[in-house]
Image: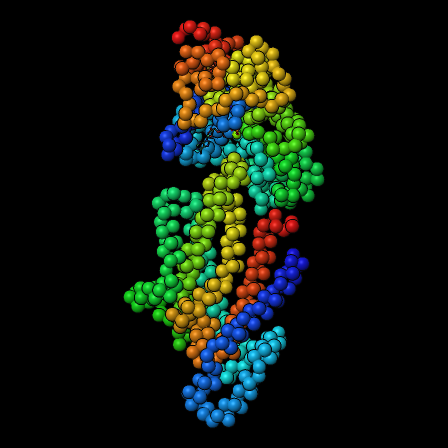
Amino acid sequence: MAGLDVRGLSVSLFTRGGVLPALSEVSLSVQPGRTLALVGESGCGKSMTALAIMRLLPEPPARIIAGKVMLGDTDLAALPERRMLGVRGKAVSMIFQDPMSSLNPVVPVGQQIMEVLRRHENLSGSAARTRAAELLTLVGIPDAEARLDEYPHRLSGGMCQRVMIAIAIACRPAVLVADEPTTALDVTVQAQILELLKRLQAETGMALLLITHDLGVVAEMADEVAVMYAGRVVEQGPVDAIFAAPLHPYTRGLLGATPSGGTAGRHTRLADIPGSVPSLAELPAGCAFAPRCKLAHAACTAQPPLKAEAPGHLAACFAALGVPAHAA
Amino acid sequence: MLRLLRRRLLQGVPLILGVIIMNFLLIQAAPGSFLDVMSAESQVSDPAMLEQLRVTYGMDQPVWLQLVKYIWSVARLDFGFSYRQNMPVLDVILASLPATLVLMLASLLIALLLGVTAGVVAAVKVNTIWDNLLSFLAVLFFAAPSFWLGIMLTVLFAVKLGWVPVGGMMSITASNQGIVATVLDVLHHLALPAMALGLFYAAVYARVMRAAMLEVLSLDFIRTARAKGLGRWRVVLAHGLRNALLPIVTLFGLQFGTVLGGSIVVETVFSWPGLGSLMLDSVSSRNYPVVLGVLVFSSIVVILVNIAVDLAYLRLDPRIRAR
Ligand SMILES: Nc1ncnc2c1ncn2[C@@H]1O[C@H](COP(=O)(O)OP(=O)(O)OP(=O)(O)O)[C@@H](O)[C@H]1O
Ligand code: SF4
Ligand SMILES: [Mg+2]
């Protein structure tokens, strides 16, 4: 099975007010059977990354201007839409934050599952229905056969997310992109959904790109973490390394860590960092985090490159990379 | 579903009662009566005879008593008697009804087909030349009065091009032609009046459809449908349309009454022998029982259609069904 390898992906928003750099040179990779958590404050470009991978960006205003989205040997970013239709829901699937509104309110859930089976698996009629019921059972919905004819509003949020997951895994995708799949759910339900994703991943060996705000979820689920800020990946590495020794001041801020090391705890949400995310229209030159960074110095008016500090652990920060304050 | 039907029907009763009372009083306030016309046309000149007729038609009685009697007879589906056609008013109405229904259905069909299609295309191609063109046409047909549109269509297609007849519902020779030829003949006559009436509503539907579709297309489940790998038009038709049609269904019910009203205007322009023509003829001959009958009868039809639309809405939207 193929993993996902995003290389130097840049997305711009072509608005009336000008061209905004929504994503700049984002590189990520998720291997089969592994989970990459994508974290960062609201508005830093996590959903944008997910949608760009799916080629579901709102066009206009958004457009991929550079980079590759490699799925095995195929560059999804370069595929014509007609061929991309054969990829979505088949090789790469996505689930979303609000499961209730993600299902069509006037169509029974069974139909919504069968639709993707008809589209990609050439199943029809009773075969599709049987398979849909199997999928519902697989995602832990009891009495599946009867549930097929329910409308979404008759199901709870957790149930709806299970249905969404059933749709997403129906064709055994190589990659599942989950954009805050548990944010809208109750705490107990959150745990169940995560458990389900883990089990399905173990069974199918799919790669999971998990977007979340929740450090508990990261600790629970992820093998790797990528931290985003203002449309860039600023730190990336194995989950243990990131929790034990975060390099980027932004990551430390998120983890509630002191610069001398040691995190505030894994079971909290991202910590608040003083100041706010700059708008895309007013990004400072150089490191976008500089206005909020205690370690900012003269060199930070240039763009810090994403460099490996330890094997597999990358950060984009002059201070973290040991550039001394007097260097510039 | 049945419970709702019963409740709606019960709610309809006071509504119909109100309609009868209002129209009855309106007609009472109108000047003259058919007896004036009769005497003016010198069918009856003897004052004693006129007095006799007044008594026969109950016109000597106090207004409230006439009203109560009228309501009572309507309840038994008796709308009075028309001296002019020498038939019960109900029979007169039923004789003209099919022509109006055919015209209305054809117009609504045109309105739905053109309006929904135009609205969907405009929404999918939003802010393109297609959207602009369709919006321009919608404004044009929305602003054009149907009688003016009717006359313009007649001038172009009937007078200048000679493609269709100027008016009427069928050719004089049609009766001995066989069923297929007759239907074709009626359709031939129907084209212009149905367009004149239907284009306005097509414009209304197009505007509502465009707005509804744009809103629906921005909803989360549309993104889900795209994430399944469905093509653009499949997403629009299979997931967007069903949701975006809901406001159209409501509008259809609300506007059924005005379509009926509009057909009166169009019928007179095209001498289409339906309720509109009957109405006009009856007003000018002060044949008030027929006028009142048409008003009350059509109100009842409109109320019934609205009940049917409510039930249809219930079928289309499972969220409402649940309540
Ligand atoms: N149509 C648009 N026009 C202008 N800016 C946009 C548009 N869509 C998104 N943005 C901007 O793109 C940036 C990235 O948004 P994105 O939704 O990816 O953030 P996110 O990391 O998913 O945040 P959240 O945690 O709130 O989901 C934001 O700054 C947002 O304001
Ligand atoms: S590059 Fe400079 S401003 Fe940016 S995070 Fe590092 S130290 Fe702070
Ligand atoms: Mg988001």
Question: In the image, what residue occupies the spot 42% across and 74% down?
Answer: B174
x, y percent for residue B59: 54, 84
On-image quarter of the C terminus of chain A = top left
According to the image, what is the colour scheme of the structure?
rainbow
- When the figure is inspected, residue A64 is found, relative to residue A249, above or below; the finding is below
- Seen from this angle, which residue lies furthest right? A143
Residue A280, image quadrant: top left
A292 to B287, vertically: above or below: above
Which quadrant of the view contains residue B297? bottom right
Residue at the far left: name it.
B160
**Which residue is drawn at the image coordinates 48% and 82% (left, top)?**
B33
Looking at the picture, tell me which residue is in the foreground, B131 or A300.
A300
**Quick check: A196 above or below B203?**
above
Residue at (48%, 24%) from the top-left corner? A277
Expressed as whole percent of the image width and height from the top left, the position of residue B287 reads 48, 80
Rendering coords of residue B4 (x, y %): 64, 58
Tally of numbered discs: 0
Q: In this image, A15 relative to A107: left or right?
A: left
Q: Is residue A36 visible?
A: no
- Seen from the viewer's position, the closer of residues A132 and B313 is B313
Give coordinates of residue B14: x percent, y percent: 61, 67
Foreground residue among A266 and B153: A266
Answer whether residue A76 is visible to the viewer in this image.
yes
Q: Residue at x 53, y 59 (%)?
A: B253
Quarter of the rendering occupied by the N terminus of chain A = top right
